Image: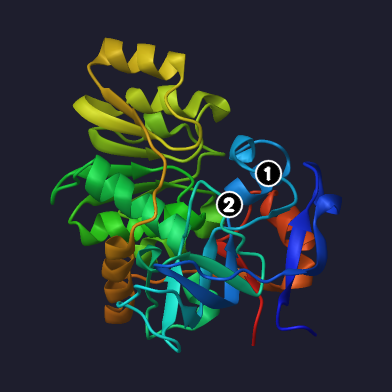
Amino acid sequence: MSEHTMRAVTIKEFGGYEVLTAERVARPEPLPTEVLVRVHAAGINPVDWKTRAGQGMAGLQTMPLILGWDVSGVVEEVGFGVTTLAPGDEVYAMPWFPRPAGAYAEYVTAPSRHFARKPASIGHVEAAALPLAALTAWQALVDTADVRPGQRVLVHAAAGGVGHLAVQFAKHLGAEVVATAREPRHAWLEELGADQTIDYTRKRFEEVTGDIDVVIDLLGDQDDNAARSVSVTRPGGLVIAIPGGVSERLATVAGRAGVRSSPFLVEPDSPALTTIAGLVDSGAVRVEVERSFALEEAAEAHRLGETNRTRGKLVLTVTD
């Protein structure tokens, strides 16, 4: 095959799984300050299938579109001016978000400072599962909430990609962690650091916990989850509404209770990725990959992901 093309999974219109098509497309070339990375693995996130369906970040995309923001791979080429990376470096990143990054492909290009050296103790599949989920959890807890030792943090949907990392980061920051998830995930979440686990299918969390300082809400308006979280949050505490921002109802309920509420959207963050890599390599944090798929199996990966029953993350393997 021509060195000027690459394998990729593209969509030409928004829709169901059937719009994901494996084909050969033009290989990108790095501009000055950019690097060309040969992708070994690409993480899959809910924003991927939401965007594919015309939701999520769909309004910022143009067709044809290569989905995906999580990448782990090896620097192939550097553009003029790049001094922090060199060909052969193993890196991981969430480049360009929320603009398209094109991670479901053999190669991506992005500014060199969107990338960080991947954790040395894990492979590319595990590293590709980290960037978007880990940065979401880290930036929410550290930058937005400024979590301190002794505080109580409630993580909703704790068994998912962002959730299982938020549990570990909150524990690392010295917080007491309350996690909601189905009962079969409880023992695992306790291994990760959860101090209290709640099966939301059997009990309403507001009946069994309280005095929360920070809520990481990964469910939003589902079952009125964000607004219900206000009732367990201390006055002056914070509810971070991640999947869709602060609704009018949440703002009203929180305001009446003297609780702060904040929207959140993750950003590329190389320094944070470097910190996270250190936590992984030290053994303080681990990432869970439930299953990996070949690049051409992206449609099946999306189908499984949309069931919302994944433990940790799903990943596409691109290059051996």
Residue 194 is situated, as x and y percent measured from the top left of the image, at 34, 56
Q: Residue furthest left?
A: 149
Position of 101 with respect to 163 (left or right) is right
Position of 6 with respect to 192 (left or right) is right
Query: Is disc 2 in contact with disc 1, using a CB cutoff of under 8 Å?
Result: yes
Q: Residues within 10 Å of mark 2 (few under 14, many from 20)?
A: some
* Residue at image coords 40%, 59%: 134
Name which residue type carries label 1. Answer: Thr
Can residue 29 be seen here? The reply is yes
> Along the line of sight, which residue is nearer the eye, 76 or 157?
76
Q: CA distance from mark 2 to mark 1?
A: 9 Å
Which image quarter holds the C terminus? bottom right
Q: Say what secondary structure mark 2 lies in.
A: loop
According to the picture, the residue beneath numbered tag 1 turns out to be: 62
> Along the line of sight, which residue is nearer the eye, 258 or 72?
72
Can residue 312 be seen here? The reply is no
Residue 100's label in the rendered image is 2
